Amino acid sequence: MNSPLEQNFYELLEVPRDATLAEIDRAYDRARAYYGPGSVAVYALATPDELKRVQDRIDEAYLVLADEAARVEYDARIGPPGPDERPLRSEVRRPPSEPAAEPPKLALVPEPPPVVPAAEPPAAAAEVKPEPKAKPAAVIASEPQAKSEPAVEPAAPPAEAKVEPPPTEPVAKAPESEAKPSEAEAKPEVRPAASEGPIPPPHMASPEPAPKAAPVRRERPAEPGSARLPRPELAPDAVVSGELLRELREAQGLSLQEIADRTKIGRPHLENIEADRFGSLPAHVYLRGFLMALARELRLDPLRVAKSYLEQMGERPGAKSRS
Amino acid sequence: MISSLPPPNPPKPPTRRRQVIAVGGGKGGIGKTLVSTSLGVELARRGKQVVLVDADLGGANVHTALGMDPPLVTLSDVVNKRGPRIEDAAMPSCVPGLRVVAGAMDALDAANPKYQQKQKLLRQVQALDVDYVLLDLGAGTSFNVLDFFLVADQGLVVLVPEPTCIENVYRFVKAAFFRRLSYLSEELPIKKIIEEAMKQRGAPRTPFQLLSEIERSVPQAAPKIRAAIQSFRPGLIVNQSRSREDLEVGYAVSAAWKKYFGLEMDFLGALSHDDEVWRSVRKRRPVLVEQPTSRVARDFSAVVNELLFLDQQRARTA
C-alpha cells in the first residue's frame, strides 16, 4: 500500500474498480469523515500540509470517479488494478465455497439510519454527471445541448436501467466500509478474499460496459411531464438553501414525490431540507448523502450543493450538527 | 454472587489454547486496567481458564480493581532467582476461573527488570497452561511495555476519544511495530534501514515502502519482514464513548492508521461512558460483577464476541 498521496483514486476512496456510483458516494462521505479536516484521527499521522494535500486529492478523486466520462478516461490512464487493490465487486459477489461468516456484533450498535438511498443500478452512472465547473451564469440557465436528449429515448431504457435488486448491500464492502454506521451491523467478511486469485482487468468483469469516448448521456425513463430541459447552473457564489433547491426542482418540473421515489429518500426529509428545518434533519452524515442524491436529481454538482447547504446550516444557531 | 450474573452468551466453539492478550495504549488513565480486568471477568464467565498478569511494572493495581487483599506473592517474586513459578503466584479472584498474578508493589528491581529476568518472565507467561493469559500493561512506550505487548498473540490498544490519547495510540503502535522489526535486525542486516525509517518525520514511510527498499537492498531479509508486517495487527477498543461520534472515532482511527501507515488495526468496539464504572472502582469491585446488566457490561460482552470472532477467523485462515 502506497502512501495516500501515491494511491490511485480507487485506493484513496477504498472502493473496487467497478464500484457503483452509490458506493463511491458513500466512500467519499466516509473518506471525508475519516481523513477530512474535522477528523481527530489523522492530525497526529502527518503534517498539516500533507493532510491538506490528501484531502484535496480525495475531493479530486470523487469529482473524477463520480463523472462517468472522466472516470473512463482515468481508468485508461492508470491501467489495470494492482495486487493491493480491492477485489472487484463482481468477484466478491460470487462467493467461493465459504459461507458468509456470522456478522459480529458491535459494542455500541448504532441505530439504523432513517432512510438510506438504495444502491443505484449501474446504469444510473450514465445520467448523473456532476458539473465540476459552475458556469458563471445566472442561477438558472438553460443549456441548449440538453434539449435534444430526453426525446431521444422516450421509451424507458431496457431492463438494466430498471431496478436491479439492490445488490445485497455489504457484499462488496471491504473492511473499512463497515465503519459507516448504517452498515455497522452487517459487517462483511471479505478480508480473506482480498488477496486471492488473479484480478481480471476491470473491463472484463465490470458489470457495466464502459461507454466509449463521447458517452451518450442516457436520460432517465421519461417521466410524465418531463420536458425538463433546462439544465440548471449554480452561480459560482450561490448559497444553496432549501429555498433555492426547491426553486431549482420546480424549474425542472419535478415533484417532491418523484424525487423521493427515485432517490428512496423519505419525502418528509426532502420537505425538511427544502424548508430549512434544520432541527428535524437527520445526522450530518446522512444529510450529506441526501443532499448529494438530491443534487444529482437536479443535475447539480453534488459536492457543492452538500457543502454549501451544510455550511449555511452550520451558521444558524441551534442547528444541530450530528447525532 | 456469580449466580446472579446473567447467563453467558451462546457458547463459541473452542479457540486456540493459551491465547496471550496484552492490553496497552500508551497513555495513562485511559482504562487499560478496566479493560483487562473486565476481559478477564467476561472470559471467565464464559467458562475459560484465565490468568491476568499485572504487568504494569511500577504502577500495579489490578488486585485493587478486583477487590483483592494486598498480595503476598507478586511478579517481583517470580522475577527473582529462587522465586515461585508464575502459575504458583496466580491467586484466585472473586470470579471463578479468573486468577491474578499481582504486580510488583514497590521493588525497584521489578520495575526495571534485567534482561534475563524479563526473558524468564516472558517465557513463563507463554507457557501458562490456561485458555487465556491477559497482560495489563503500564503506560508509555518503554521497551519493557513494548516487549510484553509483542509477546502477546493479540495486542489490544485502549483509546479514549480525545486527540491527546489518539496521538499516543499511534505513537504506541508505531513504537511497537518498530520494536518488532528491531528484533529482526538482530539476525538480519537491516538495522540501518530501520533506524533511518524511524527517524523520518512527517508522513512516515509506510512499512510497505520500507519493505520494497529492503527487497532491493537486502533481499534475503524480505520474507521475514513481510511476515512481521502482515502479522502486526493490534485490536482497538474505544473507552468512555459518549456518542456515536465517539464510536466513529474507533473506525476512523483504524482506517487512518491503515491509510497513512499501511498496517491493519481491528476496531473491536466501544465501551460506553458509564457511571457504574466509577462507582464500582470506588467499591473496589469489578463493574461486570457489581453491575452485570449495566451498559458497559453489555459493551464488554460485545467486544469479547468480536475478539473471539476475529480470533477464530484468523485461526481459520492461518
Image (tube, rainbow, N blue to C red):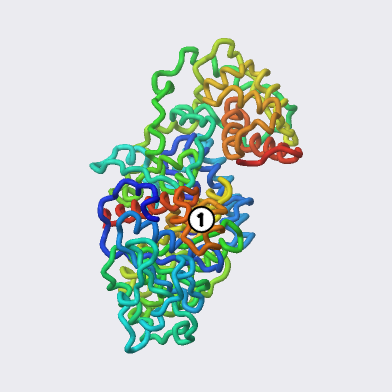
The answer to whether A231 is drawn above or below residue B54 in the figure is above
* Residue B151 percent coordinates (x, y): 36, 71
What quarter of the picture does the C terminus of chain A occupy?
top right
The answer to whether B200 is drawn above or below residue A37 in the figure is below
Q: Residues within 10 Å of mark 1 (few under 14, many from 20)?
A: many
Q: Nearer the viewer, residue A168 or A323?
A: A323
What quarter of the picture does the N terminus of chain A occupy?
bottom left
The answer to whether B11 is drawn above or below residue A69 in the figure is below
Q: Nearer the viewer, residue B116 or B56?
A: B56
Q: Amino acid at mark 1?
A: Val
* Residue B71 percent coordinates (x, y): 42, 76
Residue that extends furthest to the bottom in the rendered view of this protein: B81
Residue that extends furthest to the top in the rendered view of this protein: A224
> Dot 1 corresponds to which residue?
B238
* Residue B242 percent coordinates (x, y): 58, 49
Q: Element at badge 1?
A: strand
Q: Is residue B40 visible?
A: yes
Q: To which quarter of the image does residue A233 belong?
A: top right
Residue drawn at point x = 45 percent, y = 79 percent: B104
On screen, residue B291 versus residue A255, left or right, reads left
Residue drawn at point x = 44 percent, y = 69 percent: B68
